[in-house]
């Protein structure tokens, strides 16, 4: 059986006795074991990072960027291999797996411009003979803890920026699909990154707690579910670290009466069911405004949902593949039953779906509910599966209120032809990322990504200039080069610039 080791100090490093199982979601069997590490393994990685980081920080930013350029080339060269490996552990279809790698790569492209992003501010002549300038310096050793659903994109969002800024980065990826993160670290090394600057440690809570308690790790970036995000934020900040922790989501798609419903159905099918709904920016709730809109939308949605093709992740014709584990499939199916029990109308039932020849695979057919109410627990919580819930709104005001009052505030979309309504909605809705006729509004790499409320703990977003701020600290230098004419005036008074 294949064994997945840590990647420490530029080489594979076997973890101790504890092992996790990595499944093949297409067939339901165990395809590999991953070593679950502990504080001792982390200590080894921290030692390697401590030895390597000062020289990396002293390497000029242009040379650091060159490693990123080379890494980008290697990713492009190895795209097929990475996507196949990712798809085999996660279950997302190959085209979607390539998208996962590509969206991460876009942050690497941003990191290629790091010399520009690290330029500080400068004021010449802030006082008599005095200049003031700022430096952005790396924090030292930083860590990232990532979820199963984007095993390439989210690690690259984090380490691309952190490493380009001059930090050493320790990645603790999801133990459910840990192979791609290790391949990324190997490719970074092939691109010329010194040993110890990007390391991968595997594990579960034991390893995460070791990271949170390690004094030499100065910042932690986390993406995962909200309860864990809150825990990471509390324990990390209590230990004096800088922490950004992104959590779960329940994104709403508002459909105004004037929307192009064919376009909406097309967008919703992909945004609700793509990647089997296992995306934090999926659209699992649709909110038509007015019963007429709801009726028309429902009529068009049913055949579109029934036409979705569920298949193995290597099936080029499949719209989506299996979910990541049997436990996750059961969780999603329990939520479907909960919504039925709460009074939702189950219009399309995806439970009990089996794929011929892959009966043990973790497949779920698409489900669609109408008449879901805001007080349902199945609406209030994140399902993270191929389930679309329709909540009918009586007015635009109600449609703004639903996502605004929901516990999660990651993304939201509005579909309309009315610019004024869209503008009002974008300004007023209490959610971090908004799409206007864009179902999955994940911002491009040079803007920043981050949800509100229980979708994000901490104040600094991911990637773009906020990413640079997260992984650096600002030093401000006030300088004077006296010409020898000492005055000594006002030496005991707080200095002012006159
Ligand atoms: P998860 O919270 O189970 O795991 C995330 C990470 O935390 C993993 O590395 C895992 O090993 C670790 N972890 C798990 N349990 C832990 C514990 N008790 N203590 C400490 N660490 C623990 O999340 P997941 O199931 O891998 O990913 C899906 C979740 O991530 C969904 O809720 C999804 O919405 C969210 N997500 C959010 C974003 C975002 O940007 N907001 C992006 C992607 C995914």
Image: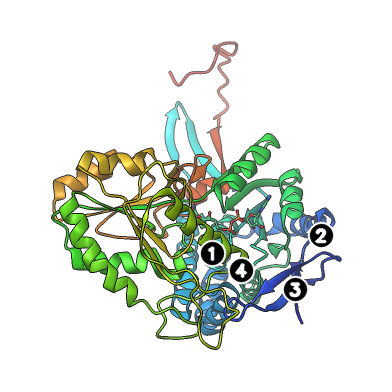
Crowding around mark 2 (Cα neighbors within 10 Å: few <14, some 14 to 19, many 20+) is many
Marked residue nearer the N-terminal end (1 or 3): 3
Name the secondary structure under disc 2: helix
Q: Is residue 52 visible?
A: yes
Q: Residue 389 at what x, y percent from top left?
A: 36, 56
Comparing 385 with 146, the one in front is 385
Q: Residue 40 at what x, y percent from top left?
A: 85, 56
Residue under label 4, please give it: 326
Residue under label 2, please give it: 41
Marked residue nearer the N-terminal end (1 or 4): 1
Judged by depth in the image, the label closer to the viewer, 1 or 2, is: 1
Q: Residue furthest bottom?
A: 357
Q: In whole angstroms, how far apart are the C-alphas of marks 4 and 3?
A: 17 Å
Name the secondary structure under disc 3: strand
Reply above or below: 429 against 248: above
Q: Which mark is residue 149?
A: 1
Q: Is residue 59 left or right of residue 38?
A: left
- Numbered label tally: 4
Q: Is residue 78 left or right of residue 206?
A: left
Marked residue nearer the N-terminal end (4 or 2): 2
Q: In whole angstroms, how far apart are the C-alphas of marks 1 and 3?
A: 19 Å
Comparing 334 with 228, the one in front is 334
Residue under label 3, please give it: 33
Name the secondary structure under disc 1: loop
């Amino acid at each position: 059986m294949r064994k997945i080791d840590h990647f420490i100090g530029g080489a594979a490093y076997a973890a101790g006795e504890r092992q996790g199982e990595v499944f093949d979601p297409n067939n339901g069997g165990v395809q590999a074991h991953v070593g679950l590490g502990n504080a001792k393994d982390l200590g080894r990685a921290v030692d390697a990072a401590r030895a390597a980081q000062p020289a990396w920080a002293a390497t000029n930013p242009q040379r650091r960027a060159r490693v990123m350029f080379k890494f980008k080339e290697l990713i492009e060269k190895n795209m097929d291999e990475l996507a196949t490996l990712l798809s085999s552990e996660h279950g997302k279809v190959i085209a979607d797996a390539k998208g996962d790698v590509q969206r991460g790569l876009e942050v690497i492209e941003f990191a290629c411009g790091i010399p520009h992003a690290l330029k500080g501010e400068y004021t010449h002549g802030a006082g008599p003979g005095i200049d003031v300038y700022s430096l952005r310096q790396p924090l030292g050793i930083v860590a990232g803890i990532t979820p199963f659903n984007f095993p390439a994109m989210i690690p690259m969002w984090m380490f691309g920026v952190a490493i380009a800024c001059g930090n050493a980065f320790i990645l603790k990826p999801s133990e459910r699909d840990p192979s791609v993160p290790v391949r990324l670290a190997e490719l970074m090394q092939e691109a010329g990154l010194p040993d110890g600057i990007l390391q991968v440690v595997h594990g579960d809570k034991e390893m995460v707690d070791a990271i949170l308690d390690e004094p030499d790790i100065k910042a932690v970036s986390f993406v995962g579910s909200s309860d864990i995000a809150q825990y990471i934020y509390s324990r990390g900040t209590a230990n004096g670290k800088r922490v950004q922790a992104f959590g779960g989501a329940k994104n709403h798609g508002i459909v105004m009466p004037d929307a192009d419903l064919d376009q909406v159905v097309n967008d919703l099918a992909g945004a609700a069911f793509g990647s089997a709904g296992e995306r934090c920016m999926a659209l699992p709730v649709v909110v038509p405004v007015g019963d007429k809109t709801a009726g028309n939308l429902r009529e068009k949605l049913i055949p579109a949902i029934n036409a979705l093709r569920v298949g193995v992740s290597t099936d080029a014709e499949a719209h989506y593949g299996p979910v990541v584990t049997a436990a996750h499939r059961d969780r999603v199916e329990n939520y479907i039953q909960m919504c039925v029990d709460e009074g939702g109308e189950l219009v399309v039932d995806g439970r009990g779906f089996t794929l011929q020849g892959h009966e043990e695979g973790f497949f779920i057919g698409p489900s669609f509910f109408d008449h879901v109410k805001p007080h349902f627990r199945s609406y209030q919580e994140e399902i993270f599966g191929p389930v679309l819930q329709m909540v009918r709104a009586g007015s635009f005001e109600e449609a703004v209120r639903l996502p605004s009052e929901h516990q999660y505030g990651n993304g939201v979309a509005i579909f309309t032809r009315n610019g004024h309504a869209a503008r009002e909605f974008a300004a007023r809705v209490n959610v971090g990322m908004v799409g206007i006729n864009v179902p999955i509004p994940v911002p491009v790499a040079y803007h920043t990504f981050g949800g509100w409320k229980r979708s994000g703990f901490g104040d600094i977003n991911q990637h773009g200039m906020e990413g640079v701020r997260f992984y650096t600290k600002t030093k401000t230098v006030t300088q004077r080069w006296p010409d020898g004419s000492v005055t000594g005036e006002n030496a005991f008074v707080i200095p002012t610039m006159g």
